[in-house]
Image (spheres, coloured by chain):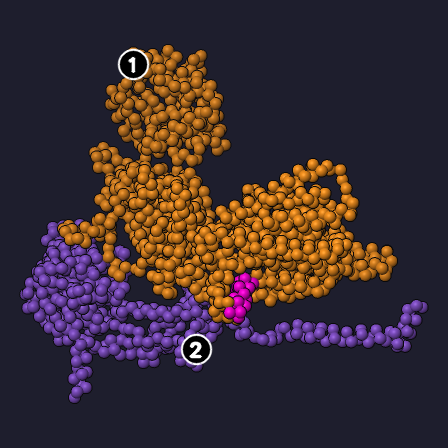
């Protein structure tokens, strides 16, 4: 029983992330109660405030007070307390995650925050309009209550949940677009080809800035420090009203008539992703060594060594770190260019690769750079030198040199023999008979 | 020579004296090299010595085998360097040995002290080796002279002061000693001396790459002896023993390896070895066969063998078994070779050709005296003196090619100067023994003279008398003594002032003579050592690689061991690219910090900006597509970072890093901000912003600046310019900040840009190098307005009420751009977008206008730009009320100009016209209708048309030339005559010229249809004839009097300019249905 309590405490601690929720007024507690309760139910600790509350703060003594921030206050012009768009950006840089939901009454504070993060909301008073995909029962006639289809979702289960089971989703709000320079942007839900963003009250539509599939209904990004940010133009998407609504799409191709909306499921999935409950992986341990050993060499490898590289990766699931099961993690052995690139074999979270080092010396890196949409960026570098052979490591006798060995030995033997012969020959000359004969012959 | 005859007591005294002199030479040589230590401190100098020191340190710490196999992962990141296999280990082994000996004798000295004092110590050994060499060549007296010379000669001191821990410090000793042993072995013909010579050569090989000089000079000597008929068995024995042993020994040095049998530089030695065998065989055979047979054998055998040897050599080179001569070898014969083919060698200042000054500076009086010694050697030539002659001649040549090789010349000069002095003194001091010693001269000199005295005594016995009087002898002897004294003074002065700077520490002096020490280098390296991660990678130009490794102990990308040119080129490319391109390279190479040397604050001329052109050149060699040297020059073709600097220059990483924040500084009281002291002008761009790197450290005198590579931004925030939907409120701080950071005064070109006619663009010299022509030739950015007139391609012009609504593109944030492709067509006009940003690589020239306005060029529909003479005086007549025709009739007007134009030379007309054309261009005219009509005769009219056609292609003015021979009727001619001349002679000629491809832009014909000039009938005939000749019809009409010219012209279908009196404006009705344009002139 005792250990169970300890486990529970640990579990509680790991899950109990502090979330600051900002609404325009306290009324949000009622209008979005289902959504907020679902977050609390997952073990997060919610603090709900008005966006212009004078005591708002994200940092205390340089430390984060909250891990996550949810802004459900579209109309806020200026944040209260020490909060501002730059303060929130600082919060992101410090690792905090942010979910922002806006609406047609969007204020400058939210728009600036979007710009700081590479997105732009359309001007206040506009809304995303789609004359083909609106909801027939809920729409007020200007075709701004949209029905989102599965094919508008990003192909990433980690962010939007299981899209195949998702019911049509309702959306009503302002258009969003990703900046041209924003390379990290994720189009979580994009508009249909017939959607555009404009003032619904306008008599005539001329050159909408945001239109077609460039329109984002939900956009997000994972910053380079793995902090997650999601922007959406619709705070209603998370509201009780939409959670419980029945959907009737004007688009005849949508079969489900009067079906329960999928908003709850989608909001849940996206929130889980933003609050880092999903798609979080980490390196537990990295090791590399020669085949047959267990520890890396103290200094360096030698060219053409056979090495084993092992990396243990874990994934956060339901608040617990469990072995990561991905099969597509690659290892690169890099010296400016990759010399070896191989898929790591995953055995229950322990990924290994066996390979022979290239016949090239230099300073190499074992590099795992795993980027998948929805997952945190996994990047691990182990630098190691690969040295050429020692002067004693070369082959001592090589086959092609045998003629040279033979010739040098024959030379030595020859010299000795010659010396002997020469010396004895000299003696022979004075005493021997044979030489005399030859001398005689010469004279003749 | 005649020592044998000297008595025993004499012998003892001479030996003692010799010993003392040599000891003193050693001491003085050693002492004079300590200036650097006295002035500064016991520190390793310059660049290469830092590596040698680091390597020695490594060897002493880890042992010899570890050093031999040392793989240095901190150099040439990420390639690494096998130190053992790429270094001449003699220096390290020598110091290590000394260290070991001292250590085992319980003298514990830090290895750095040994390194610092090694070169001065070896200078003494060099003196002794030189003594022995000279003694073998001439006499012991000459040897003492030579020893004293070499001990203090600046040419040698320059490379061997304390702290200059470089290969040359010990190599010169090895060189001299090897030569001594070679001469000795040649004289004795003994295998033992030859073997010793080979051993000494081995030491030389292990110490310095200059050993190639020995292995070529000795064979050359052998060859010269053979050719001179001085072959002897002594030569055979000494050379063959030396060659075999030396080759095998030299191959034991890992860095040399198989080079002695595989490179062309070593082949002559091998060839001579073969030749000697043949010559020996001949000598052997000569005594044993008949003369006839010998000649056959000699001629036949030698030819066949020689031919065979050459064929085999080339076959081996072709087959790749023997490497051809290296670039360094060629650069010895062609001083321009390195600059073209191996810029990295040419970029080193010590590889530049030597100036005469440095001959005097390094050798002083010995440079003047050594030819005397050479002459004596030639006069009294023997086997070994042939050697010194060859040595001197080749060394003089090489010293002339490269400053650095002054070092090999110095020993030869010292030997020969020693011989020269010695011989002269021998002759002139013969009877002057008692006057010999001057009290004021230095110690060594006294001993020198004493030695000479001893010598001169012996020479008297030879009875070599000549008729020089005693007084002359005295004068000469004293003069020579004074020269010698001056040499000592000079040598000391040069050593102290020129060669004793560590260059790691800089020194300058204030006005009152106080010394200022600038220790910026060590300050920066110390900062790196203390404040950066142990494995931080520092990018710098290769000059500083060894110092960073040695002093900061950090990983470098390139260093002074310039073995990998492409890696250096990569660093050069990073330095010469703009920030974003450099960032990519730096990321690829894992660079953490970048270090630049900047001398602009203190006026240090050896900084990176002055070396920068070499970086560009080396980078261009490997990446010709990305880096082009031309882009770094100003418009007038000079290398500058001042106001005229090119855009590429101002945006490259090197410029930015050198001058970042420099614009804020003022070096002098009256000086403008950003005044560069080294180059003596104010820099071209002061407000430098860095996006991808940040300043990490700048030393006290700004000499070393260190930058840190930033990480990519965590979030992709949008820049102000990228925001497409403006936020109106902009109340918050963030928006304000963004606005503020937007540079307000960028470097701008002229604010008004005229479109050039499309055709002309292609001719404008953009196409000079077609090989690497970019896809687009021009991008004009930062425009506030583009005046288009029309914006759809079907419409060519506006008329009527439409003309109020010309199409204008506007941008509040100056974000418009125009992109012109290679054929000169506008490929894009409008907002600057990311697509264009991506194409930047492919754009030849970018003009940033910072809010400029682009409008179409003006079309001038009527001009007579080719003329001579000035008609200003006619204004007076006109002001007095004279009419156009009055002026004409008074001999002014067209007639005046006609006369002058007829007289003018074609070149002058052309020059004047081009001036006018430039002015027109400057004021916005890009298309010009230009008429002839000041010749009115065949020759001049054609001349004018030629001028119009042959306008220089550099002037991008589009000209449509008009033949206007019927402009007026010249004096002495009538309307009818003139018409006939035009129709029957001039027009056929023009037609003919045009057929031949000349007068390409003559497109129109014009007539002045006016009462009293050309009446309607003649006008019609001329225009009709011109139309037949393929010219477009054009005319002046109704200018003065209404005679119905317009009606006539309209029937011919004109399309050209005609000045019409506005009072007759109704006539326009005639022309309206036709697609023609007209110029209405107000009446003067």
Q: Is residue A242 visible?
A: no
Q: Residue furthest bottom?
A: A1
Q: Whole-percent x and y of residue A259?
A: 13, 72
| Magenta stretch holds residue B87 | yes
Identity of the residue drawn at 16% across and 74% down:
A16
In the rendered image of the structure, the colour used to display chain A is purple
Q: Quadrant of residue B379?
A: top right
Q: Secondary structure at mark 1?
A: helix
From the top left corner, tell me how far across and down residue B793 is, in percent.
30, 42
Residues tagged by mark 2 and mark 1 found on one chain of the structure: no
User: Residue B33: where, in percent of width, then height?
Assistant: 52, 53
**Chain in orange?**
B
Report the residue marked by disc 2: A290
* Element at label 2: strand
- First to last magenta residue range: B82-106
Secondary structure, magenta segment, majority class: helix
Residue A64 lies, in percent from the top left, at 18, 66
């Amino acid at each position: 029983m005792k250990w169970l309590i300890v486990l529970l405490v640990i579990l509680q601690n790991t899950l109990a992330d502090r979330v600051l929720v900002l609404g325009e007024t306290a009324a949000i507690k009622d209008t979005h109660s289902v959504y907020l309760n679902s977050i609390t139910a997952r073990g997060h600790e919610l603090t709900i405030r008005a966006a212009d509350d004078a005591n708002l703060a994200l940092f205390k003594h340089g430390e984060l007070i909250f891990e996550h921030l949810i802004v459900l206050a579209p109309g806020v012009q200026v944040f209260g307390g020490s909060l501002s768009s730059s303060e929130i950006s600082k919060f992101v840089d410090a690792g905090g995650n942010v979910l922002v939901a806006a609406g047609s009454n969007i204020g400058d504070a939210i728009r600036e925050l979007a710009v700081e993060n590479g997105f732009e909301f359309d001007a206040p008073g506009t809304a995303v309009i789609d004359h083909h995909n609106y909801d027939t029962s809920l729409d007020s006639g200007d075709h701004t209550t949209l029905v989102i289809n599965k094919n508008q979702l990003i192909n990433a289960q980690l962010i939007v949940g299981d899209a195949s089971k998702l019911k049509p989703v309702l959306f009503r709000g302002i258009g969003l677009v990703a900046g041209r320079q924003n390379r990290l942007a994720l189009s979580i839900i994009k508009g249909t080809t017939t959607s555009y963003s404009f003032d619904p009250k306008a008599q005539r539509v001329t050159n909408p800035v945001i239109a077609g599939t460039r329109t984002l209904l939900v956009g997000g990004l994972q910053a380079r420090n793995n902090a997650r940010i999601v922007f959406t133009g619709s705070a209603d998407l998370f509201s009780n009203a939409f959670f419980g609504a029945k959907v009737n799409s004007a688009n005849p191709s949508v079969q489900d008539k009067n079906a329960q909306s999928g908003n709850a499921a989608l909001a849940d999935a996206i929130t889980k992703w933003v609050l880092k409950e999903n798609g979080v992986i980490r390196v537990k341990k990295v090791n590399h060594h020669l085949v047959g050993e267990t520890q890396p060499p103290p200094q360096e490898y030698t060219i053409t060594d056979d090495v084993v590289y092992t990396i243990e990766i874990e994934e956060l699931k339901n608040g617990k770190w469990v072995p990561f099961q991905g099969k597509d993690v690659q290892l690169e052995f890099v010296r400016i260019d990759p010399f070896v690139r191989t898929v790591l074999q995953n055995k229950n979270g322990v990924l290994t690769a066996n390979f022979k080092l290239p016949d090239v010396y230099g300073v190499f890196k074992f590099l795992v750079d795993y980027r998948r949409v929805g997952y945190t960026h996994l990047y691990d570098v182990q630098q190691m030198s690969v040295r050429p052979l020692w002067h004693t490591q070369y082959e001592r006798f090589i086959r092609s040199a045998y003629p040279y060995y033979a010739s040098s030995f024959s030379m030595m033997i020859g010299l000795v023999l010659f010396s002997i012969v020469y010396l004895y020959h000299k003696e022979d000359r004075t005493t021997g008979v044979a030489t005399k004969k030859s001398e005689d012959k010469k004279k003749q | 020579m005649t020592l044998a005859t000297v008595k025993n007591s004499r012998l003892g005294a001479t030996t003692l004296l010799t010993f003392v002199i040599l000891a003193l030479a050693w001491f003085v040589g050693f002492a004079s090299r300590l200036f650097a230590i006295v002035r500064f401190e016991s520190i390793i100098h310059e660049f290469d010595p830092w590596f040698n020191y680091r390597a020695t340190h490594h060897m002493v710490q880890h042992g010899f085998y570890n050093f031999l196999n040392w793989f240095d992962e901190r150099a040439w990141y990420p390639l690494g360097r096998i130190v053992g296999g790429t270094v001449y280990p003699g220096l390290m082994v020598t110091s290590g040995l000394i260290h070991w000996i001292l250590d085992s004798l319980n003298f514990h000295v830090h290895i750095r002290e040994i390194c610092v004092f090694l070169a001065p110590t070896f200078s003494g050994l060099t003196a002794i080796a030189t003594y022995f060499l000279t003694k073998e060549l001439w006499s012991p007296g000459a040897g003492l002279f030579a020893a004293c010379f070499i001990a203090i000669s600046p040419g040698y001191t320059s490379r061997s002061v304390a702290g200059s821990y470089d290969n040359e410090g010990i190599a010169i000793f090895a060189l001299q000693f090897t030569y001594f042993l070679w001469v000795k072995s040649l004289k004795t013909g003994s295998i033992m001396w030859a073997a010793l010579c080979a051993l000494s050569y081995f030491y030389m090989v292990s110490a310095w790459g200059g050993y190639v000089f020995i292995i070529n000079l000795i064979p050359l000597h052998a060859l010269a002896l053979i050719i001179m008929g001085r072959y002897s068995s002594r030569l055979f024995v000494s050379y063959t023993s030396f060659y075999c042993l030396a080759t095998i020994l030299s191959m034991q040095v890992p860095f040399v390896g198989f080079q002695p049998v595989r490179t062309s530089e070593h082949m002559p030695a091998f060839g001579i070895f073969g030749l000697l065998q043949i010559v020996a065989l001949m000598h052997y055979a000569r005594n044993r066969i008949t003369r006839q047979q010998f000649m056959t054998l000699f001629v036949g055998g030698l030819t066949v063998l020689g031919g065979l040897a050459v064929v085999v050599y080339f076959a081996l080179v072709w087959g790749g078994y023997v490497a051809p001569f290296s670039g360094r070898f060629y650069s010895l014969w062609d001083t321009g070779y390195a600059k073209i083919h191996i810029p990295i060698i040419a970029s080193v200042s010590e590889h530049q050709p030597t100036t005469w000054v440095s001959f005097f500076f390094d050798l002083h009086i010995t440079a003047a005296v050594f030819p005397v010694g050479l002459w004596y050697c030639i006069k009294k030539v023997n086997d070994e003196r042939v050697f010194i002659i060859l040595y001197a001649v080749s060394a003089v040549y090489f010293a002339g090619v490269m400053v650095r090789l002054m070092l090999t010349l110095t020993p030869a000069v010292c030997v020969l100067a020693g011989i020269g002095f010695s011989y002269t003194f021998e002759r002139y001091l013969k009877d002057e023994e008692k006057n010999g010693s001057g009290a004021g001269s230095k110690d060594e000199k006294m001993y020198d003279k004493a030695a000479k005295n001893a010598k001169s005594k012996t020479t008297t016995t030879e009875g070599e008398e000549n008729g020089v009087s005693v007084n002359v002898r005295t004068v000469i002897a004293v003069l020579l003594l004074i020269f010698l004294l001056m040499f000592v003074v000079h040598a000391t002065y040069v050593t102290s002032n020129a060669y004793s700077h560590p260059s790691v520490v800089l020194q300058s002096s204030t006005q009152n003579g106080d010394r200022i020490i600038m220790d910026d280098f060590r300050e920066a390296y110390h900062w790196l050592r203390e404040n950066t991660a142990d494995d931080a990678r520092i990018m710098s130009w290769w000059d500083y690689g060894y110092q960073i490794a040695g002093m900061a102990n950090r990983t470098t990308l390139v260093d002074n061991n310039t073995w990998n040119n492409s890696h250096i080129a990569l660093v050069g490319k990073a330095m010469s690219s703009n920030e974003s391109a450099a960032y990519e390279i730096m990321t690829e190479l894992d660079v953490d910090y970048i270090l630049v040397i900047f001398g602009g604050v203190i006026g240090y001329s050896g900084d990176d900006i002055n070396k920068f052109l070499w970086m560009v050149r080396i980078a261009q060699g490997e990446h010709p597509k990305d880096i082009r040297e031309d882009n770094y020059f100003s418009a007038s073709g000079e290398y500058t970072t001042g106001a005229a600097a090119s855009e590429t220059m101002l945006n490259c990483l090197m410029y930015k890093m050198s001058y970042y924040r420099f614009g804020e500084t003022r070096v002098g009281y009256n000086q403008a901000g950003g005044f560069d002291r080294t180059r003596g002008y104010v820099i071209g761009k002061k407000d430098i912003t860095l996006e991808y790197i940040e300043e990490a450290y700048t030393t006290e005198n700004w000499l070393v600046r260190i930058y840190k590579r930033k990480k990519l931004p965590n979030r992709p925030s949008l820049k102000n310019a990228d925001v497409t939907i403006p936020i109106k409120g902009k109340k918050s701080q963030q928006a304000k900040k963004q606005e503020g950071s937007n540079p307000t005064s960028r470097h701008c070109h002229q604010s008004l840009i005229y479109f050039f006619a499309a055709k002309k663009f292609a001719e404008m010299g953009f196409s000079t190098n077609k090989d690497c022509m970019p896809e687009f030739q021009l991008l004009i950015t930062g425009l506030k307005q583009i005046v288009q007139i029309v914006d759809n391609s079907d419409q060519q012009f506006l008329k009527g009420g439409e003309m109020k609504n010309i199409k204008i593109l506007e941008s509040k944030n100056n974000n418009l751009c125009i992109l012109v492709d290679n054929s000169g067509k506008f490929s894009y006009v409008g907002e600057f977008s990311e697509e264009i940003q991506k194409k930047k690589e492919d754009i030849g020239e970018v003009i940033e206008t910072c809010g400029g306005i682009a409008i179409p060029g003006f079309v001038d529909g009527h001009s007579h730009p080719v003329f001579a003479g000035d008609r200003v005086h006619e204004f007076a007549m006109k002001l007095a009320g004279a009419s156009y025709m009055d002026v004409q009739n008074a001999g002014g007007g067209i007639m005046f100009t006609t006369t002058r134009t007829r007289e003018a030379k074609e070149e002058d007309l052309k020059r004047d016209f081009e001036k006018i054309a430039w002015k027109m261009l400057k004021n916005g005219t890009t298309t010009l209708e230009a008429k002839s009509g000041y010749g009115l005769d065949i020759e001049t009219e054609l001349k004018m048309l030629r001028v119009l056609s042959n306008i220089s292609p550099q002037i991008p003015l589009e000209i449509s030339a008009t033949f206007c021979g019927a402009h007026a009727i010249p004096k002495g001619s009538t309307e009818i005559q003139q018409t006939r001349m035009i129709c029957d002679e001039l027009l056929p000629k023009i037609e003919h010229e045009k057929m031949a491809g000349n007068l390409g832009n003559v497109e129109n014909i014009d007539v002045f249809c006016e009462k009293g000039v050309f009446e309607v009938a003649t006008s019609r005939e001329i225009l009709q004839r011109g139309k037949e000749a393929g010219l477009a019809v054009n005319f002046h009409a109704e200018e003065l009097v209404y005679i119905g010219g317009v009606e006539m012209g309209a029937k011919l279908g004109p399309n050209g300019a005609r000045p019409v009196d506005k009072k007759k404006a109704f006539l326009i009705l005639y022309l309206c249905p036709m697609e023609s344009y007209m110029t209405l002139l107000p009446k003067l």
